[in-house]
């Protein structure tokens, strides 16, 4: 039985429409695993929302987006001369984040006699990709036949994001760049409204992924299925590693393993003393051979018996807790951006 993302369709669609209504220049983002839904499904849904532009992560994702979305496709990863999957389809908008790449792409477009559209990305405090502020005017002079469609900002998720966006907006207005469009990532709705109000000559276009597709988490439920159940005594050795169990209980074999992303944790952002204390406590337990699983039984996450297998996991339920039956569904507490589902079921 599969690992399933179950979606309350009515509630999810209502959330999507609410986000689109509050962001009239919305650019939906569909990249990677499509936030758990799959990129093709989100590309079609972006068209349903009426968006004219869809943002994808890499050039490898462009073809799938073009076949499912009727508008333009903006590639968030910056263009580089060594890339082999680049499409000069007129619906594709390329991102340029290095000064030297501007002239190189212009020359390639000229040689291919292609109509190529681009955004220039500014180097924000994220310090990931982008042109320095003092490079914008020089880059404008190297665009040649490239058609500039906007300046893009990939902002951090904390700090003075609005203030940073304000400084770039002011710079865009006095620069030589022949555009009045500013794409922004990671600004809240209120921040976008404030920025647009302070710079009415600019069109501010928020690029939204997580807050759009996953913004109403209560509409989404992740489940796995109990495939087998074994009563075990204290000290029983189980699993590949034959580790002895510390107490009597039930070993459940459940769907979901490393092939689904189960147990493959991304680094966590620990911002409070309590979060760090919990992490330290878990680290000590994991050093002793125990690791907390995302599978929930009786309202609590239960411990892995050992590292997840490729498609199933073994979890331990103490004897004091009624064990679910074979065929029952368990809730999972997982990050949807790092999980691959066997099925996505949109109900309603």
Image: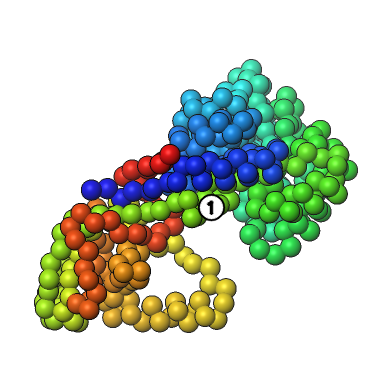
At a point 63% along the width and 59% down the height, the residue shown is: 157
Residue 310 appears in the picture as rendered: no
In this view, the residue farthest toward the right is 174
Q: Is residue 293 left or right of residue 71?
A: left
Residue 159 appears in the picture as rendered: yes
Q: Position of residue 298 (x, y in %)?
A: 31, 69
Q: Which residue is mark 1?
A: 216
Q: Position of residue 171 (x, y in %)?
A: 84, 47
Q: Position of residue 152 (x, y in %)?
A: 70, 43
Q: Position of residue 210 (x, y in %)?
A: 55, 50
Q: Is residue 157 left or right of residue 334?
A: right
For residue 53, which quarter of the picture?
Answer: top right
Q: Is residue 206 above or below residue 305?
A: above
For residue 72, which quarter of the picture?
Answer: top right
Q: Is residue 95 above or below residue 198?
A: above
Q: Is residue 175 above or below residue 286?
A: above
Which is nearer the eye, 63 or 219? 219
For residue 291, which quarter of the picture?
Answer: bottom left
At a point 68% along the width and 54% down the height, the residue shown is: 188
At a point 40% along the width and 53% down the height, the residue shown is: 221
Q: Is residue 341 left or right of residue 25?
A: left
Which is nearer the eye, 274 or 344? 344
Q: Is residue 269 left or right of residue 164?
A: left
At a point 38% along the width and 78% down the height, the residue shown is: 282
How many numbered marks are there? 1
């Amino acid at each position: 039985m599969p690992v399933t993302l179950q979606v309350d369709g009515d509630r999810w669609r209502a959330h999507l429409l609410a986000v689109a209504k509050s962001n009239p220049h919305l650019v939906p983002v569909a990249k990677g695993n499509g936030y758990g839904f799959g990129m093709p499904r989100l590309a079609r849904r972006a068209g349903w929302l009426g968006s004219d532009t869809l943002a994808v992560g890499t050039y490898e994702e462009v073809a799938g987006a073009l076949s499912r979305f009727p508008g333009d496709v903006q590639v968030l990863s910056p263009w580089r001369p060594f890339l082999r999957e680049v499409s000069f389809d007129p619906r594709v908008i390329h991102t340029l984040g290095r000064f030297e790449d501007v002239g190189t792409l212009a020359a390639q477009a000229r040689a291919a006699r292609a109509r190529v559209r681009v955004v220039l990305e500014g180097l924000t405090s994220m310090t990931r990709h982008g042109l320095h502020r003092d490079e914008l005017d020089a880059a404008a002079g190297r665009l040649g036949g490239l058609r500039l469609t906007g300046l893009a900002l990939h902002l951090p998720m904390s700090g003075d994001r609005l203030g940073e966006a304000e400084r770039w907006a002011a710079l865009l207005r006095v620069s030589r760049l022949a555009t009045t469009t500013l794409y922004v990532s990671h600004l809240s709705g209120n921040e976008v409204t404030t920025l647009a109000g302070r710079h009415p000559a600019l069109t501010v276009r928020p690029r939204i992924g997580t807050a759009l597709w996953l913004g109403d988490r209560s509409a989404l439920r992740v489940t796995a299925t109990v495939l087998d159940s074994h009563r075990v005594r204290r000290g029983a050795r189980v699993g590949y590693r034959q580790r002895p169990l510390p107490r009597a209980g039930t070993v459940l074999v459940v769907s979901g393993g490393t092939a689904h992303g189960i147990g493959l944790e991304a680094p966590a952002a620990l911002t409070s003393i309590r979060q760090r204390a919990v992490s330290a406590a878990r680290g000590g337990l994991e050093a002793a051979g125990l690791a907390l699983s995302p599978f929930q039984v009786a309202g609590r996450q239960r411990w892995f018996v050992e590292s997840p297998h490729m498609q199933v996991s073994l979890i331990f339920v103490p004897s004091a807790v009624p064990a679910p039956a074979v065929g029952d569904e368990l809730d999972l507490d997982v990050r949807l951006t790092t999980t691959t589902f066997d099925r996505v079921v949109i109900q309603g």
